[in-house]
Amino acid sequence: MSTTHAIYAQTTVSMTDLRRNPSGILEDAGDTPVAVLNHNRPAAYLLSAKAYEALLDRLDDVELTKTVRQRQGGKRVRVSLDDL
């Protein structure tokens, strides 16, 4: 059993403190993630709605980039804007 744990946030909060003041913690964090610790181990990450939406946008961009790369070099079809 490992005694060390990677934490992917600069800010941490205990479960107890999160229960006491969730809105205050979100306000203090702004758009940065907060690692929620349970017995000094990361149990979850807390994100504002704005940060979560930005994360989803980035993931969508990654998927679109994969699609573009897969289609590069494929058959080309000439289209006139007037025909559209």
Image (cartoon, rainbow, N blue to C red):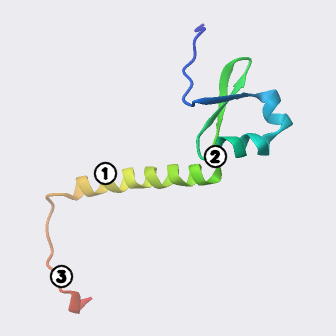
Q: Disc 2 versus disc 3: distance between alpha carbons?
A: 47 Å
Residue found at the far bottom of this picture: 82
Please identify the quarter of the rendering in which residue 24 is found.
top right
> Label 2 amino acid?
Gly
| Residue 73 image-quadrant placement | bottom left
Question: What secondary structure is found at the residue carrying circle 3?
Answer: loop
SS class, disc 2: loop
Rendered location of residue 54, percent (x, y): 52, 53
Q: Percent position (x, y) of residue 57?
A: 47, 55
**Residue ID for mark 1:** 66
Mark 1 Cα shell of 10 Å, populated few (<14), some (14-19), many (≥20): few
Could you tell me which residue is drawn at 78 percent across and 29 percent down? 15
- Pointer 2 or 1: first along the chain: 2
Which residue is painted at 18% across and 57% down in the image?
A: 72
Q: CA distance from mark 3 to mark 1?
A: 24 Å
Above or below for 12 versus 52: above
Q: Is 69 placed left or right of 19 in the picture? A: left
User: Which one is earlier in the sequence, the residue at label 2 or at label 3?
Assistant: 2
Q: Which residue is mark 2?
A: 30
Q: Is residue 13 left or right of residue 81?
A: right
* Residue 47: x %, y % from top left: 63, 44
Residue 38 position (above or below residue 21): above
Mark 3 surroundings: few (<14), some (14-19) or many (≥20) residues within 10 A: few
The label number, if any, that marks residue 4 in the structure image: none
- The label shown at residue 79 is 3
